[in-house]
Each structure stands twice: as C-alpha cells, then as structure tokens.
Image (spheres, helix red, strand yellow):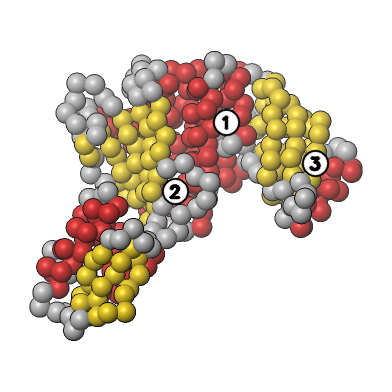
Amino acid sequence: MTALPVEAITGYLRATGWYPQPRMWTTLTVWTHDDGAEVLVPARDGMNDAELRVRELLQGVAAREGRAVADVALDIATPPADMISVHTHPPDAPSGWSSLSFAVENLTSLTNVVHATTRAVDQGAYIGSRGRLPKKVHDMVGRMQVGPARAGSCVLPVRVPVDDYARRVLVRLNTALDAVRMAVAQDDLAAFRHAVVAGASADLCDALSGFAGEQAAWPFGFSFRWAAGDAPGHTVPEMTFDAGAGARIRAGARFLRTTQDLGTVTVTGLVRTARIDRMVQVDTVWMRLLNLTWFDAAVTAQKEKHPVTVSGRLVSEGRRAELKVDRFDVIDCEG
C-alpha cells in the first residue's frame, strides 16, 4: 500500500475528533481521541517506514470506528463523501451475494429512490412523477459510486461526493425513509399521508418495495454515514424494514395514488416560498393561504426565518400534494 499523505491523514483525524499531543518524536507525532485511543502519525511524507506506520495507524482508526481498514483509507485519500448502504436479504444466497436479476433490481430501485427524493427537494411534496428530471439530478446520480457488495446478508455501499445539493437530497431521503418506516408500523394505510409530508411519495414507496424482492416479502434496510466531521443533525443512522414491510409499502403507494383526500396532517417547518398568488411552501408542503392574515404572517415568517405550524387536510391535486389549511401559527422562537 502506498503511504497516504500526512496532510490528508491529519485532516481526517482532526475532522473525526482526534487531536495531536504536545509530545513529539523525530519521526512521529502522537494523536489521541477523547475515548483514550492513540495513533502515531509520520512526522512528514517520504520517511522510510511511512508505509508501515500508516498501516498501523489505519488499523487503529478502523478498530475505533468499527470499519474496514480499506474504507478508512478510501475516506482519507478521496474528497469528502457521504455513504448510504442498502441492506438486502435475498434467501438461498451466500452472504454478500444475490442473483443477477435482484442485483439489477436493487440498482434500479436505488436510482428511482434518488429520483423521487430529488423531486421532493426541488418541487415539494408530491404523489407521483411530474415531468423530466433536471440535469443536476442526472449529474448527481452520475457522481454516485457503487462499491463492492459486502457480507451481512448483502450490503451495497454507495458513496455520494459531498456538495450542498447532494447533502440536501440525502438528508431529505433519511427523513422520508424514517417516515415510511413509522407509517409501516401503524395498522392504517392512511398513515402514509405523514410520509408524504416528510418528502416521501408513491414513487418513493414503489421504489422501496423493490428492495424486498418480486413478492415484496424480504426484509431490507438502510444505513447512513456522513462525511467526516460534517454530519447533519436530526438524522437516523440506520433503519430496518422487516419481512412483509415491502408489501405494506407497496400498498401504501397504491393508497396515495388512488385517494383524493389523504386526511388531516400537521406540518412544522420554515416557509420556503411565499408567492404573490398566495401559494406558500412550508418545508416540503404547498398550500394556498386565502386568509390574508395568514399569508402576511407567512411572508413575515419567511423574512425573519421563524418556523410555523400549519394544520389541515392533505389532498391530491393532480400529482401534487396540497394542504387545505384550517390553522396557521407562527412559532414564537423567544417563548
């Protein structure tokens, strides 16, 4: 293994909570972590024993993070990237393997999941597909890197180079997946309306069911690992969907596509858009505020970045989800 540049190593260590100790030898510096872990870093590039020292360092960091040495080395050597891993459990297949047809289905499902999430980010909450995807979406998918499948039954890791748009998409996906998971846990398909508010859609649900196999019967799950030192708040690191969840998610997609009035929901978030025609977007959800007092409050909340809480019936307007508002409140940030 070629020794990694010292600057790249120390940059990664700083970003992940390590810090150098004042003591230093001629050829090594000592770095420690708050949990007591300790590694030795070559003092400069080009030293005779650099490869050995870097190998030992990688083993120490990997052991502390519970990851493979190769994964840590890749993170140090390449630009920052978020990681989403898809966990599937095809029966009668050795750990880390799946049939070719299921592997192709997984890649198709993952691409469709990303496409559905980008629509929610760009256009707001919706039910079904609406028009062509913009070039930036295809560019993002083109930059995503699929790694070798791993044991445990079959884990497909995908690296997503960090930029503002890709991060927004992955954070929204994390939120939407968690909302779908909570909807599955309820004995009521109408619970999927809350997943729509979170940025899910019938498109996303159909794509998710693909990870459960043709009969939507197999368990599956997702895990997220954010770029070193740059983790967003309020995200869920791992989500699992038990056997049978895929069928329920598929039924949820049918419910969303065929139901006009999805039921009552509450949306809390920032006002993203307030248009002159009184169409307002709160978090992902669009609504028309015919009440002038509410609209004026929404405009002010947007300017002052105050969160709001809105309640009403979520309805399907063509392919878009829209809230018919019966209550609008600005949250008092100083209260």
Q: Which amino acid lies under the numbered mark 2 shown in the image of this protein?
A: His
- Residue 245 position, x and y percent, is 43, 21
Residue at the (69%, 40%) spot, across then down: 268
Q: Looking at the image, tell me whether mark 2 or mark 1 is earlier in sequence order.
A: 2
Q: Looking at the image, tell me whether mark 1 or mark 3 is earlier in sequence order.
A: 1
Which of discs 2 and 1 lies nearer the camera? The answer is 1
Alpha-carbon span between mark 1 and mark 3: 22 Å
Q: Residues within 10 Å of mark 3 (few under 14, many from 20)?
A: some
Q: Secondary structure at mark 3?
A: strand
Residue at the (50%, 22%) spot, across then down: 185
- Residue 189 position, x and y percent, is 57, 18
Q: Secondary structure at mark 2?
A: helix
- The residue tagged 1 is 195
Which of discs 3 and 2 lies nearer the camera? The answer is 3
Residue at the (24%, 66%) spot, across then down: 39
Residue reaching furthest right? 292
Alpha-carbon span between mark 3 and mark 2: 38 Å
Q: Residues within 10 Å of mark 1 (few under 14, many from 20)?
A: many
Q: Is residue 218 left or right of residue 172?
A: left
- The residue tagged 3 is 329
Q: Is residue 301 left or right of residue 161?
A: right
Res 331 seen here? yes
Mark number for residue 138?
Answer: 2
Residue at the (52%, 28%) spot, across then down: 182
